[in-house]
Image: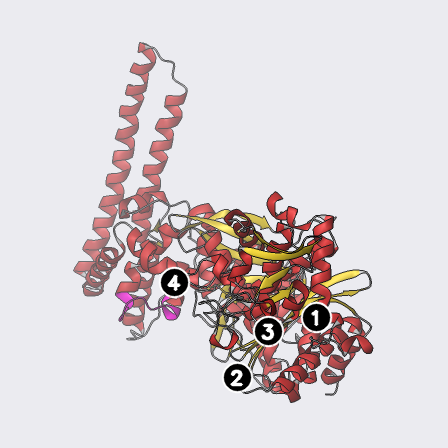
Amino acid sequence: MLETIWSIKLKFTAMLKEIKWNLSFRKQDLQSIKEFFSMLFHLLLVYTILFISDVLRFLKFMKSMISKKIIFIPLIIMFLLFALYLSFINGSPKRELFQEKIFPKFYYDTAIEIRDPKDRFAGTMAQPQSLVTNPSLFIDKVPSLFWSLLQEKYDPSLNFDSNATLFYEALFEGGYYNGIDVSSPLTESKKLILRMITEQDLDIKPNLTLTQQLINAFIKKHPFEEHTNNIKRLKLAKTFFHQLKANNGLNFKAWLLTQRDFFLVNGKGYGLKDCVEIFFGKSMDELSSAEEAILLALYEKPYHMNLSLKKQKQAWESIKNDAITLVNNSEIIENHYKIVSDIKKMTFPKLPSFPDSLMEVVGKITSKNQEQFSSLPTRSDALLQSLKGALNEDLDKLFQEYSISPKSKLLTKLTLNFDLNENFYFNHYFKAQIESLNLSTFWVSVVNEEGNLVRLYQQNTEYLHPPEIGNISKIFSTLLFVDRGDKYYTQYCNKNSKDELSSEVGEEKCVPKAWMDTRRLFASNKMLPNYDAFIKYKEKDKRGNNIYYEPIYKKKIEALYQNLALTSLENNEPIVDLGTGKLEMTPLELQTSLHKITQLLYNPNRISQGLKLIKSFEYHDIKESIIEEEVKFYSFESPEQVSPTFQNFFTKEKRITLQTIFKTPIYKNYGSLQWLKNYINVKFVFAQESHKNGVHWLVGAFKKSGKYYSFTIYLEDKELSKSKIKHRFQKVLESTIKSIVKSRKMKFEYMKQVFRD
């Protein structure tokens, strides 16, 4: 029966080709047209006779079947089942369902590839808005041999050029219809009938197409309805296939191989690209034919990584045997012997596998640390450690700034802007150094001249509402005062202000004892300069003490905020926050602002560099829920420019005044750093403390080997006494600086821990 239908289809196709061929050789005149129609009549007559012959043959076959009463009822059942099957998959795809319910779930389940400046694969991170704990990497390009083998085994009729949404179109276009091979149910029905007649066995499982496998894998991860039975999944075939088939199935392949589990850790599955990195420690375009065959075996049966060494080796042998069977049974492979030989030679992989360059960071895979590197998300947790929280904050801002969302862009790769291995060692070294301090909420960071983060350690510092940074605001206020022309001996009135805290009230009037010069005021633990200083100041000249009324105008304050990315308290005017010594910023934001000031003060010939955790990122554009093939690249490597107004804050004369003021806490007995300069070979250029309501800050800059570094230390604990706070600041800063000055010792300390096994 199937042969008869196929014969009619082939004859019809041949007739159309013959008509087209004859028409192409005819001239456009009356005689040619007459000849064509004469030929057409004879051609149609011949093919009509052939069609009738096929139909009569089919009817004769049916008559014989009915007369003999052989499989008549199963045959009717087959046709009914096939008709029912077509009713499920018939029709057009549901675009709204895909865009509103299906696509966003895929987007939030896709991970971002994280690489360091040396292009080492550090691991993955989920999209920041996602709560998914086991995201997989989006696949830009599928290995050709792997895909050919996969299609040969599961879905040889898969055709991404098929536009058929009606059955008769599919029948004459090549048999692929709404993501389903239309001949598949007929073949399966035939098997069912034969099994029922010969073996009286109805237990037969259909060979699912890749479209059906994709739907099953996706719904297993993302049930977007309460109950999704087989019939509903079958109806989804047209929606998935037609929405994802663009660019020769780029999206289809990416979705299938991202959702499909290739290996599992703690019950969580990961996709193809993750598997390539974990199993082989290389990119997909570097895979050998043997490795691609291994991946196909993993597609069929995922590898469980939480196994004993004995079971891992047994599973590996089973994977190799499955891969060899797949290769031997393939008709598309010519060099079977070579690939099979390569598979047999493959040794048990040391799971997880690392690129050689990354082993420089890890040091050694042991039974203790294997689990934390066994999947790409856990690898990024282990390598990035406390940087991950700060990176997430940066990512959230990046997503807002570049409108990255399920309807616009899919972020696929990030390149970091800091030395991965140095900070990896620092986190291990530093944690051991400060263990006795029992710090709960804490942050320390150092930034170099290039604007790169060279040290960061944080603990429980992810917060929605940043703490007020207290009197450190004086650093920013002083820039405005010196820009106005104030000197280090200029005096300001410590006058009571309604915006001051009750514990820091000033004088009711500007009596002589209320006036404080800039250096004394800057070194004071009071939240000053106060609001009054923005309006008036006092200087001593030949005529005595003179009070000047010269307000700092709004455009200068705006320039300060914009160029340093300062954050004002909610519903407050910026001048009020600066004037009363309060701002609301995260440690990372404060570090960025401080670093710019350091470089403008001490490296005026350099272009100002901001602090950026992310060096560059890549993304795919999304149009109508389709991921475009072209990858777009955005780089942050160019230095940040400061406005001409703000550059004028740092002329030579103003820089001398600012440096004089900022040095005060270092060389007087007010600051915590007085002891450090005695035995640490580092020159501190300035530092400033803040202690308000249990929130403690120490920020500043130091010079080492002719280069300037800025640093930030933040800790929060309302129970600490002043002496304990000072001790903690000293220990933290001492350990941080030693990690920079003696980086080889820091690395040695980590390696000693690792190789103790």
Choose between 379 and 243: the one closer to the eye: 379
Compute the Cα span from label 2 to label 3: 23 Å
Q: Nearer the viewer, mark 3 or mark 4?
A: 3
- Mark 4 lies on residue: 105
Choose between 482 and 334: the one closer to the eye: 482
Judge the density around disc 2: few (<14), some (14-19), many (≥20) Cα neighbours within 10 Å.
few
CB atoms of marks 3 and 1 within 8 Å: no
- Which region of the structure is painted magenta? 219-231
Quadrant of the image occupied by residue 524: bottom right
On screen, residue 87 versus residue 142, left or right, reads left
Specify whether residue 92 is in view.
yes
Q: Earlier in the sequence, mark 3 or mark 1?
A: 3
Q: Earlier in the sequence, mark 2 or mark 3?
A: 3
Q: Nearer the viewer, mark 4 or mark 2?
A: 2
Question: Where does the C terminus fall, quadrant-wise?
Answer: bottom right
454 versus 5 height, above or below: below
The amino acid beneath tag 3 is Ser
**Residue shown at 55% from the left, 49% from the top:** 556
On screen, residue 23 versus residue 87, left or right, reads right
Q: Nearer the viewer, mark 2 or mark 1?
A: 1
- Mark 1 lies on residue: 665
Horizontal and vertical percent for residue 535? Answer: 53, 55
Horizontal and vertical percent for residue 24? Answer: 40, 22
The amino acid beneath tag 1 is Pro
Q: Earlier in the sequence, mark 4 or mark 1?
A: 4
Q: Nearer the viewer, mark 4 or mark 1?
A: 1
- Mark 3 lies on residue: 386
